Image (cartoon, rainbow, N blue to C red):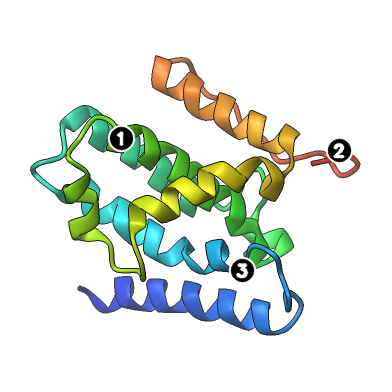
């Protein structure tokens, strides 16, 4: 693994951990937020795996691009590491659909995090509505579903006074 990738991964993990020890202390969804670097790593590893079909690699590339984009529904640059929550939810949603199409062992093989990745994905998808708020979760799912149909996905940050 190159120094850049190790640094990016570690910097992301350190930033999330520091936020959870400070402003985010007692954050209800800390476990899922801490999984963000490992989920991004998993997405990248799966995108490079020759056993993953090309159509799924294209889906993974879209999620990776969303994950690292500076502007999304909850921009990390504006609200801090808590902004990774919708990235985590989108990653879990996309991986959940993929696991139904490819051998789940391929996903497990690339997991660098703790515990069973398939169980983590399932739990994230189950709590995403409450974790993000119904409106944001529906917007994120609609964005993903449109992109999978080939529509041009349109995504923008939430308006200042718009409720999650």
Nearest the eye: 47 or 112: 112
- Label 1: how many Cα within 10 Å (few below 14, some 14–19, many 20+): some
Distance from label 3 to label 2 (Cα)? Answer: 24 Å
Q: Which mark is residue 98?
A: 1
Residue annotated with mark 2: 162
Q: Residue at position x 47%, y 54% from top?
A: 68
Q: Where residue 121 appears, x then y in whole percent? A: 43, 49
Q: Earlier in the sequence, mark 2 or mark 1?
A: 1
Are the residues flagged by discs 2 and 1 in contact, CB closer than 8 Å? Answer: no
Residue 30 numbered mark, or none:
3
Residue 54 place in picture, x, y as percent: 17, 31
- Residue located at (45% from left, 23% from top): 147
Q: Nearer the viewer, mark 2 or mark 1?
A: 1
The residue at the point 48 percent across, 23 percent down is 145
Q: Is 57 situated above or below 37?
A: above
10 Å neighbourhood of mark 3: few (<14), some, or many (≥20)?
some
Eye-nearest disc, 3 or 2: 3
């Amino acid at each position: 693994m190159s120094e850049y990738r190790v640094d990016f991964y570690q910097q992301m993990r350190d930033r999330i951990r520091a936020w959870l020890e400070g402003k985010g202390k007692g954050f209800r969804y800390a476990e899922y937020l801490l999984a963000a670097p490992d989920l991004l790593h998993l997405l990248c590893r799966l995108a490079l795996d020759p056993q993953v079909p090309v159509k799924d690699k294209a889906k993974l590339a879209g999620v990776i691009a969303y994950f690292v984009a500076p502007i999304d529904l909850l921009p990390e640059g504006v609200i801090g590491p808590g902004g990774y929550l919708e990235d985590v939810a989108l990653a879990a949603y996309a991986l959940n659909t993929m696991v139904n199409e490819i051998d789940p062992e391929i996903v497990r093989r690339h997991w660098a995090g703790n515990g069973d990745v398939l169980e983590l994905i399932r739990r994230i998808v189950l709590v995403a509505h409450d974790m993000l708020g119904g409106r944001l979760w529906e917007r994120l799912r609609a964005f993903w579903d449109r992109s999978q149909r080939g529509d041009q996905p349109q995504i923008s940050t939430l308006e200042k006074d718009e409720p999650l």
